[in-house]
Image (cartoon, grey):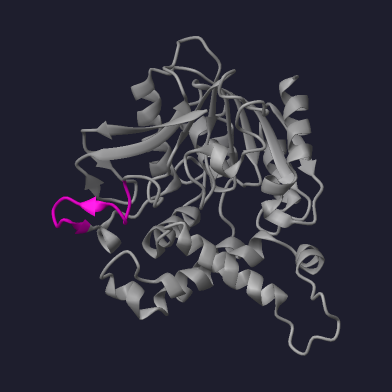
Amino acid sequence: MMKRHVYHHGETFAFESGGSLPALDLVYYTSDREYCPGEKVVWVCHALTGNSNPEDWWPTMVGPGQMFDPSEYYIVCVSMLCSPYSACGPASVNPATGRPYFFDFPQTTVRDIVAANILVRKHLGISRIDLMLGPSIGGFQTLEWVIMEPDVVADAVFLATATRVLPYMTAFNESQRMALLSDPSFKAAADLHGGEAGLRCARSMALISYRTFAGYNLTQAEKDDDVLFADRAASYQRHQGDKLVARDFDAYSYWYLTYALDSMNVGRGRGGVEAALARIKARCAVISITSDYLFPPEQGRATAAALCDASYYEIDSIFGHDGFLIETDQLAAIFRRHLGL
């Protein structure tokens, strides 16, 4: 089982884009025991709307009896800065005003998120991470981390991700931000319920990018061929928007996280992507999903080819980017092969 913790970092934290906070409170989960130096550490970096308890959102991979069993490995996962499930983001309380930060929180990049993770690593006294893995923006974090701390991570898995954000993803992100801005309550920032209608719409847009033509046609086809107006897929989109809001995922956190996605570029300030990847010392695995529109396999193959020590794998799925949550049997087989289990 995993256990929740909060680490208070009482020193100034400077953000890459400018601005700083006098302190950070960082929510994280670990295996339910104290870290014992020398035991194998698995560090999981979570995806956009996930949280820092991977047993919640990846129960077929992390948990008792699963591929990554907290009793066999010391597992760590830290809530991303700006996640509503963290204690540090636009939804957290600004001590200067007694209200949520809303738009006053510093703009946050993937490198900032990794820097906060590193604070937790040091707090726990972990000097070596045996395996680091992350899907999607979790893969962004994993890529940045093995560049920022090349001597810390022994083995890294980049799952359904890329070395930099590309225009197709940014177009989706901006469309979602436009949806948030179209909701007057979002701009008013009166409370954390602001922008809920816009957030429902943004989530619906995002889901289309996570899935595929074939996947929707398989799972959301009308049961009645003679229906006058098709509604099953529409109902599904509305349900997904409602579900995110019901999880207390606020629109302000979502807004900031979309910009964090748009910050991804491992080559920024490092002489380009290839020069940045050349810094990596970890043994790497790159895993793509055949139908992923956001991170198509050609990107994954190019990343693997640019790395010094990397294996490349593909998950065959009609479910697009979300295949990392669905095709868990294939994913477990890849992990066993890569890790020699």
Q: Position of residue 258 (x, y in %)?
A: 47, 59
Q: Is residue 177 visible?
A: no
Q: Position of residue 81 (x, y in %)?
A: 38, 46
- Give above or below for 237 relative to 57: below
Quarter of the image containing the C terminus? top right
Q: Is residue 19 visible?
A: yes
Task: Judge by depth and name the residue closer to the eye, 75 or 235.
Answer: 235
Q: In the orientation shown, which residue stands out farthest toward the right?
A: 225
Quadrant housing residue 205:
bottom right
Question: Residue at 42% of width from left, 70% of height from top?
Answer: 196
Question: Residue at 41% of width from left, 62% of height from top?
Answer: 255
Q: Is residue 94 magenta?
A: yes
- Give above or below for 58 relative to 256: above
Q: In the orientation shown, which residue stands out farthest toward the top?
A: 38
Q: Position of residue 199 (x, y in %)?
A: 46, 69
Task: Judge by depth and name the residue closer to the eye, 165 or 21.
Answer: 21
Task: Judge by depth and name the residue closer to the eye, 192 or 182.
Answer: 192
Q: In the orientation shown, which residue stands out farthest toward the left?
A: 96
Q: Is residue 114 magenta?
A: no
Q: Position of residue 78 (x, y in %)?
A: 44, 36
Instruction: Identify the magenta region.
Output: 88-99
Task: Tell me: 49 left or right of 22.
Answer: right
Q: In the orientation shown, which residue stands out farthest toward the bottom?
A: 228
